[in-house]
Amino acid sequence: EAQVTQNPRYLITVTGKKLTVTCSQNMNHEYMSWYRQDPGLGLRQIYYSMNVEVTDKGDVPEGYKVSRKEKRNFPLILESPSPNQTSLYFCASSAGAWNYEQYFGPGTRLTVT
Amino acid sequence: AQKVTQAQTEISVVEKEDVTLDCVYETRDTTYYLFWYKQPPSGELVFLIRRNSFDEQNEISGRYSWNFQKSTSSFNFTITASQVVDSAVYFCALGRSNDYKLSFGAGTTVTVRA
């Protein structure tokens, strides 16, 4: 089954404790992206990647890192999480540019205390 | 900078009523893409439609229809004869063709009452 998976689905952590949210797709997609969803703000793009070793900032990259060492994986790293990073995070992938549908993962709800 | 505005925060209708969701966008690009996504209460994001800036044809898919008007920078979405299963948050989004950034509106929550 074609899908985008994220782990963990729920995470409660404390300020400053490094964490990684994994994202994996099994569709051989070139494009992958991370978004955060906050009430009243919709989804905001954090980082995106057009291919292996190619990443670029979205609208809200501060406090986040990403890497794309393999085509299928695009982990989101929070080196020193803060309470303002409490949010619902979505990973997405698509075959290429906007002519292709973007598939979203199920979301990861992160709480930083 | 590009921006998407969904001025309606919440809409509540009774089943079988029609509902129109407004989406207004701002961009300086001549080539861009517009999208609608649905987020039901279960939380996943479901792709509904994509339009590129050169295709102003309106589209109908079952009870869903979309009206793209470049002159007013709008890409509105209408649900005809709404059903309870249409209750969801709907997002409009704008994609740039030169850097693959995607900007979402704040979303409109639609509640359809039986």
Image (cartoon, coloured by chain):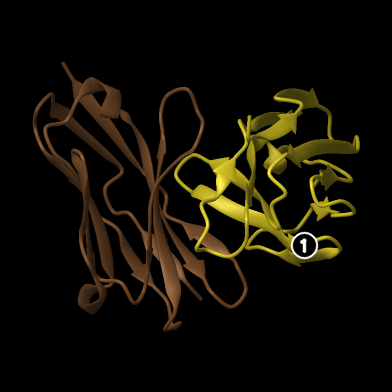
Chain colours: A yellow, B brown
At a point 49% along the width and 39% down the height, the residue shown is A39
Tell me residue B59's x, y (percent): 22, 56
Residue at the outermost top position: B114
Tell me residue B45's x, y (percent): 49, 37
Amino acid tagged 1: Asn
SS of the residue under disc 1: strand
At a point 83% along the width and 60% down the height, the residue shown is A52
Q: Which corner quadrant of the image does residue B87 belong to?
A: top left
Q: In this view, does B28 lie above or below A12?
A: below
Label 1 belongs to which residue?
Answer: A51
Tell me residue A12's x, y (percent): 76, 23
Residue at the outermost left position: B17
Is residue A13 toward the left or the right of residue A29 in the image? right
State which chain disc 1 sits on: A
Total marks drawn? 1
Depth order, front residue of B25/B31: B31
Q: Which corner quadrant of the image does residue B111 belong to?
A: top left
Is residue A67 toward the left or the right of residue B111 in the image? right
